[in-house]
């Protein structure tokens, strides 16, 4: 008898404990994100690519700059066109380029640069854009007008022109890539955030906070920005591929990373030059980059659905 | 007896969601006879809407329905969509709650009304147009010809709902299902819409299903009533039995929860403050005007609040009543300095509020708090309710330590009837009533001297309304604070207010003690408002002289609008500077704006 009542008490306690923890928005969002198969597969795929890029030296016996003149422009061992294969050269899984460097290792080193640019430049644009946009939107009126006209002004500067000026003034520098791309990408972020803030400002809970005596800065950081997270997180996942593409474009023009260091954009540019004689030089970097971009977009879609407040 | 038009047997509706199944409707059976009006009452979540969505095959994707639904003997549950489409719209029509979202914004009214005729009956354009005009006359839309070419945003809420009813009835359906058709509307407009539905029933012999949470609405129109709770029909029967001889305790509960105009027993109003209680708030000639662009360069002032004056004593409750657009919320925000005022003064305990700098204002916010209308919208969805309640403490009393704040939050949560263990939960986990308790707790935590309740209970179910009103009354008697209680619902204001102010287009039309205004209203607008309040008593509702109003409330931009009740002083020019009706003291403490029966002696 006592045992029965005891276990009933236990059950009640367990239920109470579960009630106490509640279901937060983030727990809900995570559950919805993880039930989205495409998003989960994309996250796994990106993690694998990222880990391989980090561990690149351990995965292959070749260095990214080591040239092996015995295996110049060799196709991978399993390439269908046997005439260009160099079986003696060893295990070059993605083949080699025109100066005998292993393409597999170079793709992984390229991933380091491209993903780093992608994440860092996006974070830079995120930080500037969110704060700037939220402030402009919340302030409204003349301040908003002035701040947004400044954004328009920067928008009207041609991107390439801007990068070339930076290169001339500060000389070619890997760090400049982040600055140049981040400086352009935050503009769109600021616009999106400002628009969202304008509609958020009308919400009753903002008015409630004002009635509670909360100051403007506190309202922006405590009430406006957290509620922007949904659209912002989604836009971030769309910005990362954008940034990677921008870096590729700059590298394609020769304004990006310098040899022997490489990025996906540089590899694709090289591959495109030789695609008639050595198509694998284009196929592998382009394929992996396309796959990574797909992954980012799927994750973005998944996050958008997971963070949609209507789905609560 | 003829065959029922709709026969529902054993209808069961379930929804699949992440946390399991929801059994929304549990084996419900009923009949609807020809020309009959079936009222369906229940609180939100009782499954009353889902029952009828399932009946006409409009369930959401994750819902499944089983049982049997026969329309004139034919089974219609589970019919393929194209056959249901043919039936819905032409034989069975539905009117939804929100008239704006149910109309397509980019199509003119005429096109939308004719759409059904042209697709169901393949009528040529001119015949369809003729029919559409006729139906617009029936639903009493004035200047029907011009309205046909207008877009939904050009119409008022009441006009839109009439247009929706016109769309629904244009094909001459046997059965009209109206899902809370008047919930989003003002009382006077609600009375007009109900009158139109009553006419459809008697003149066109249409059967009507009226779904509502308001017993008053049901009493006026229904022949038979279903009372629903948690998916079950707990009681059903003729309307008189339900209202005069309710058997189920839940029906009695619903009836008791209805605030009534004729008496205010049940809720104990706080005793009126002593005559020598000090004035804490003095508002004189307060005006808030918004510039509205009427042309590329021209602007016109929209007088949202126009020369409103009153004083409020400590411990007193002032009721502010008016329909949408009457400026009652603007008034609240102007008093709290959330909106800049155009003219007049607000004096709080001897201090001019407007003269203060920002820092002083913040200190004053310790004394002045507000409870908002929409409980969910007024809470930040990304903050726990504990954080929301603590916010005024953090910003206005920053010297408190974290433990002190948390202790106070827990104390106030107990006071407003929330379990302190819920401190870390988020607003979306709670019902509207619980969230409104959070709103009340947030306003009360710094022990303010004046709380403004801006339609604080309007978005809640009737039974929850009663709970929140009681909570506010209890807190008032404990703390001795003053209240400004803003509502469009005269019956609720009666329960709390010591004095009542009636606003019409930003101006006071009547201002008197609560007793006086309800027993002896003097201004025609107050009388209209009182007459329009639905009473949960079928006999009274039937005996009511039904309003035959077709007019909309005039636009506040039109300077003639103010003189709607004082036509003798009207200058018929929309831009002319008009006479402003003054307040006349008809009895001690009873102020009435001049109207055609009462003009000042001068």
Image (tube, coloured by chain):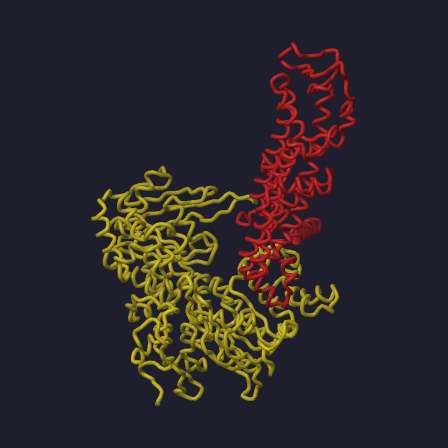
Chain colours: A red, B yellow
**Residue B236 in sight:** no
Q: Identify the residue at horizontal 44%, vertical 58% (top origin).
A: B42
On the image, the x and y values in percent for residue A182 come to 66, 44
Q: Quadrant of residue B521?
A: bottom left
Question: Can you name the residue that lies furthest to the top here?
Answer: A83
On the image, the x and y values in percent for residue B598 come to 34, 84
On the image, the x and y values in percent for residue B9 come to 37, 46
Front one among B309 and B418: B309
Front one among B468 and B36: B468
Front one among A298 and B171: A298
Q: Identify the residue at horizontal 46%, vertical 54% (top origin).
A: B46
On the image, the x and y values in percent for residue B537 come to 36, 68
**Residue B451 in sight:** yes
Say above or below: B272 vs B564: below
Q: Quadrant of residue B593?
A: bottom left
Left-right relation of A238 to B187:
right
Front one among A195 and A311: A195
Count of picture labels: 0
Q: Identify the residue at horizontal 23%, vertical 46% (top origin).
A: B125
Say above or below: B574 vs A9: below
């Amino acid at each position: 008898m006592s045992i029965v009542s005891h276990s009933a008490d236990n059950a009640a306690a367990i239920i109470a404990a579960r009630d106490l923890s509640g279901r937060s928005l983030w727990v809900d969002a995570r559950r919805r994100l993880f039930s989205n198969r495409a998003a989960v597969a994309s996250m796994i795929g990106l993690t694998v690519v990222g880990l391989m890029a980090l561990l690149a030296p351990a995965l292959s016996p070749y260095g990214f700059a080591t040239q092996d003149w015995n295996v110049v422009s060799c196709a991978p061992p399993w390439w269908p066109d046997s005439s260009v294969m160099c079986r003696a050269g060893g295990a070059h899984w993605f083949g080699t380029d025109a100066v005998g460097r292993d393409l597999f290792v170079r793709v992984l080193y390229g991933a380091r640069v491209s993903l780093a640019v992608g994440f860092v430049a996006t974070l830079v644009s995120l930080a500037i854009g969110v704060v700037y946009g939220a402030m402009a939107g919340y302030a409204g009126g003349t301040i908003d007008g002035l701040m947004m006209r400044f954004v328009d002004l920067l928008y009207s500067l041609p991107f390439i022109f801007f990068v070339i000026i930076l290169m001339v003034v500060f000389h070619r520098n890997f760090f400049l890539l982040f600055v140049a791309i981040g400086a352009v990408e935050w503009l769109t972020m600021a616009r999106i955030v400002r628009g969202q803030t304008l509609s958020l400002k009308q919400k009753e809970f903002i008015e409630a906070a004002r009635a509670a005596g909360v100051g403007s800065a506190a309202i922006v950081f405590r009430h406006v920005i957290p509620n922007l997270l949904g659209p912002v997180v989604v836009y971030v996942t769309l910005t990362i591929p954008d940034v990677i593409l921008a870096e590729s474009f700059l590298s394609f023009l020769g304004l990006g990373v310098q040899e022997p260091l490489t990025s996906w954009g540089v590899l694709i540019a090289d591959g495109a030059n030789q695609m008639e004689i050595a198509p694998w030089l284009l196929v592998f970097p382009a394929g992996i980059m396309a796959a990574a971009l797909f992954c980012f977009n799927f994750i973005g879609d998944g996050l958008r659905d997971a963070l949609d407040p209507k789905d609560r | 007896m003829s065959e029922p038009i709709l026969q529902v047997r054993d209808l069961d509706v379930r929804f699949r969601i992440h946390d399991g199944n929801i059994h929304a409707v549990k084996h419900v059976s009923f009949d609807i006879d020809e020309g009959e009006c079936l009222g369906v009452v229940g609180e939100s979540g009782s499954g009353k809407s889902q029952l009828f969505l399932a009946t006409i095959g409009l369930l959401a994707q994750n819902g499944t329905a089983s049982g049997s639904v026969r329309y004139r003997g034919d089974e219609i549950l589970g019919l393929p969509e194209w056959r249901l489409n043919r039936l819905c719209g032409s034989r069975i029509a539905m009117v939804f709650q929100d008239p704006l979202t149910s109309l397509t914004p980019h199509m003119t009214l005429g096109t939308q009304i004719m759409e059904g005729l042209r697709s169901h009956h393949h009528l040529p354009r001119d015949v369809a147009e003729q029919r559409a005009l006729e139906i617009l006359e029936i639903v009493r839309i004035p200047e029907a010809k011009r309205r046909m070419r207008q877009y939904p945003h050009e119409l008022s809420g009441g006009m839109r709902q009439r247009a929706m009813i016109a769309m629904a009835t244009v094909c001459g359906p046997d059965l009209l299902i109206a899902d809370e058709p008047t919930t989003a509307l003002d009382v006077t407009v609600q009375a007009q819409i109900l009158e139109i539905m009553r006419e459809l029933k008697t003149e066109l012999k249409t059967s009507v299903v009226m779904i509502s949470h308001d017993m008053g609405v049901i009493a006026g129109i229904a022949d038979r009533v279903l009372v629903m709770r948690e998916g079950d029909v707990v009681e059903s029967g003729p309307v008189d039995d339900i209202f005069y001889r309710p058997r189920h305790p839940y029906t009695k509960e619903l009836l008791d929860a209805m605030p009534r105009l004729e008496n205010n027993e049940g809720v104990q109003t706080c005793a009126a403050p002593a005559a020598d209680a000090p004035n804490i708030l003095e508002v004189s000639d307060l005006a808030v005007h918004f510039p509205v662009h009427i042309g590329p360069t021209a602007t016109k002032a929209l007088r949202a609040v126009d020369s409103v004056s009153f004083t409020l004593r400590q411990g007193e409750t002032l009721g502010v009543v008016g329909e949408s657009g009457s400026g009652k919320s603007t008034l609240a925000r102007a008093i709290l300095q959330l909106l800049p005022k155009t003219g007049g003064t607000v004096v709080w305990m001897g201090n001019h509020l407007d003269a203060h700098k920002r820092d002083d204002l913040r200190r004053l916010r310790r004394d002045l708090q507000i409870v908002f209308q929409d409980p969910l919208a007024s809470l930040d969805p990304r903050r726990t309710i504990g954080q929301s309640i603590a916010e005024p403490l953090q910003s206005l009393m920053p010297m408190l330590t974290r433990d002190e704040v948390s202790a106070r939050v827990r104390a106030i949560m107990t006071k407003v009837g929330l379990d302190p263990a819920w401190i870390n939960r988020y607003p979306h986990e709670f019902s509207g009533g619980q969230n409104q308790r959070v709103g009340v707790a947030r306003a009360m935590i710094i022990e303010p001297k004046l709380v403004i309740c801006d339609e604080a209970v309007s978005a809640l179910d009737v039974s929850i309304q009663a709970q929140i009103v009681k909570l506010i009354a209890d807190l008032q008697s404990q703390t001795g604070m003053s209240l400004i209680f803003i509502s469009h619902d005269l019956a609720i204001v009666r329960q709390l207010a010591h004095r009542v102010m009636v606003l019409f287009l930003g101006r006071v039309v009547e201002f008197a003690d609560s007793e006086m205004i309800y027993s002896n209203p003097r201004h025609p607008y107050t009388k209209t408002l009182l007459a329009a309040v639905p009473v949960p008593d079928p006999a009274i509702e039937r005996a009511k002289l039904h309003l035959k109003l077709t007019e909309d409330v005039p636009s506040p931009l039109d300077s003639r609008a103010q003189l709607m009740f004082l036509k003798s002083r009207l200058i018929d020019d929309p831009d002319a500077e008009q006479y402003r009706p003054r307040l006349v003291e008809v009895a001690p403490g009873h102020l009435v704006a001049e109207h055609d029966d009462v003009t000042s002696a001068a």
